[in-house]
């Protein structure tokens, strides 16, 4: 890890749902990577995760990791090798450790939301360079009384400057071979179709273009998927491509954006897949119209290296592309690969923003 990227500010890692695998994969990440960061969460829950991982590995003395409760976030800088600093933000339930592993629990939802809000505040105040979020559970979030269906919407709301409306954001799921950005996310399929408008498609293309420039692509090739089978087949299977998506692409091209489409959604992801040397991708990123259209292709390629990135926020935020995996919680067998990739992608985005800010 480059000191020039992170010093003197750390990455903030949120614990996610205390009843899921988030704490355990954070422990495995810390053992494997020793990141310059701090965990926002419950020290007791994280200490339990260390014990779970140690027991799963069958080693009485390992992994060597000491959980240190921080009185304030800045104390992370005093820690040494083999230590994980955990700061408990305001709003954590006092009995969170009693929430049963592998089950939806209101207390876990309250804690997850409190950690996100605290992480956003740290990012806004310049206390951290970016945020990496462990998985939360949407049912637990709802049980806690949160009106936001997931991370993306909560981050969008909390990331807005005081007195200003939330900035438009988009969800991108990516791995080494494919990047896909969604026009609509956590709504029903019927609502998603209604939300595919010329304005929403154009806004997604613009956010994608700006974000791709931040990670180093001066003129990204953006493929835009159609909504209907065969991209409508000239209006035979639907006319959204003619009256909505096509005009949005034309306007994007008028703005100097290299947007291509609308393209048949059943083949565009295969065409964009970049696996050199045998399969160079035709496009750098695909704009998909709704959640499953865009996420199934990426997740089918494997969850181990997938990363979720929220585009459009005033700070960097990444996360693994899997959920809380309640069936694995408490076993210590969870794979941290996606979380590690999320951390590394955060490094790339932070570095890219720094270079653009310096004019390099």
Image (tube, rainbow, N blue to C red):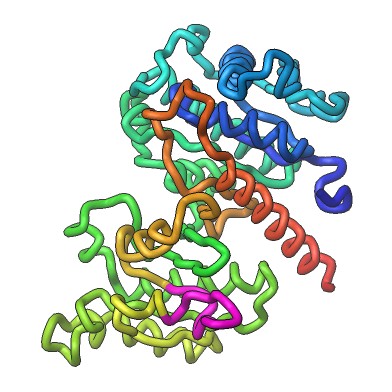
The answer to whether residue 266 is left or right of residue 61 is: left
Work out which residue is located at the far front of the displayed protein and give it: 58
Residue ID at (48%, 37%) = 135
Relative to 244, is 307 above or below? Answer: above
Query: In the image, is residue 283 part of the stretch drawn in magenta?
Result: yes
Residue ID at (46%, 59%) = 170
Q: Position of residue 38 (x, y in %)?
A: 71, 31
- Quarter of the image for residue 35 reads top right
Query: Number of marks in the image?
Result: 0
Q: Position of residue 11 (x, y in %)?
A: 71, 41
Relative to 237, is 2 above or below? Answer: above
Q: Which region is colored magenta?
A: 271-286
Query: In the image, is residue 314 part of the stretch drawn in magenta?
Result: no
Residue ID at (55%, 75%) = 275
Relative to 69, is 156 above or below? Answer: below
Q: Position of residue 225 (x, y in %)?
A: 34, 77
- Rendered-image quadrant of the C terminus: bottom right
Residue 90 shows in this picture: no
Q: Main secondary structure of the magenta part?
A: loop
The residue lying toward the viewer, choosing from 290 and 205, is: 290
Residue 272 shows in this picture: yes
Q: Position of residue 337 (x, y in %)?
A: 58, 46
Work out which residue is located at the far left of the displayed protein and give it: 236
The answer to whether residue 185 is left or right of residue 210 is: left
The answer to whether residue 220 is left or right of residue 252 is: right
- Quarter of the image for residue 231 reads bottom left
The residue lying toward the viewer, choosing from 266 and 86, is: 266
């Amino acid at each position: 890890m480059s000191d020039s990227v992170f010093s003197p500010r750390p990455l903030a890692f949120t614990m996610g749902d205390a009843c899921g695998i988030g704490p355990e994969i954070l422990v495995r990440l810390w053992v494997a990577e020793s990141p310059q960061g701090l965990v926002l969460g419950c020290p007791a829950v994280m200490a339990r995760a260390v014990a779970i991982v140690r027991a799963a590995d069958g080693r009485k003395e390992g992994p060597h990791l000491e959980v240190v409760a921080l009185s304030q976030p800045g104390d992370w800088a005093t820690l040494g090798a083999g230590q994980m600093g955990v700061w408990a933000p305001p709003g954590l339930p006092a009995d969170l450790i009693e929430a049963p592993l592998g089950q939806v629990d209101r207390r876990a939802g309250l804690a997850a939301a409190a950690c996100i809000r605290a992480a956003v505040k740290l990012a806004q105040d310049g206390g951290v360079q970016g945020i990496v979020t462990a998985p939360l559970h949407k049912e637990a979030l709802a049980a806690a009384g949160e009106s936001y269906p997931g991370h993306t919407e909560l981050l969008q709301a909390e990331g807005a400057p005081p007195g200003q409306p939330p900035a438009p954001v988009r969800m991108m799921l990516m791995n080494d071979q494919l990047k896909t950005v969604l026009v609509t996310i956590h709504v029903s399929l019927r609502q998603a179709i209604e939300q595919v408008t010329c304005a929403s498609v154009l806004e997604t293309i613009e956010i994608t273009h700006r974000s791709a420039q931040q990670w180093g692509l001066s003129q990204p090739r953006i493929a835009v998927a159609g909504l209907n089978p065969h991209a409508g087949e000239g209006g035979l299977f639907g006319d959204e491509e003619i009256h909505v998506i096509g005009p949005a692409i034309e306007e994007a091209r008028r703005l100097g954006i290299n947007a291509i489409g609308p393209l048949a959604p059943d083949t565009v992801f295969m065409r964009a897949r970049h696996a050199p040397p045998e399969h160079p991708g035709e496009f750098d990123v695909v704009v998909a119209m709704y959640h499953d259209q865009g996420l199934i292709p990426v997740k089918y390629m494997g969850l181990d290296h997938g990363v979720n990135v929220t585009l459009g926020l005033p700070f960097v935020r990444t996360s693994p592309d899997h959920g809380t995996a309640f069936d694995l919680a408490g076993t210590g067998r969870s794979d941290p690969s996606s979380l590690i990739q999320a951390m590394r992608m955060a490094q790339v985005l932070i570095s890219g923003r720094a270079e653009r800010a310096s004019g390099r």
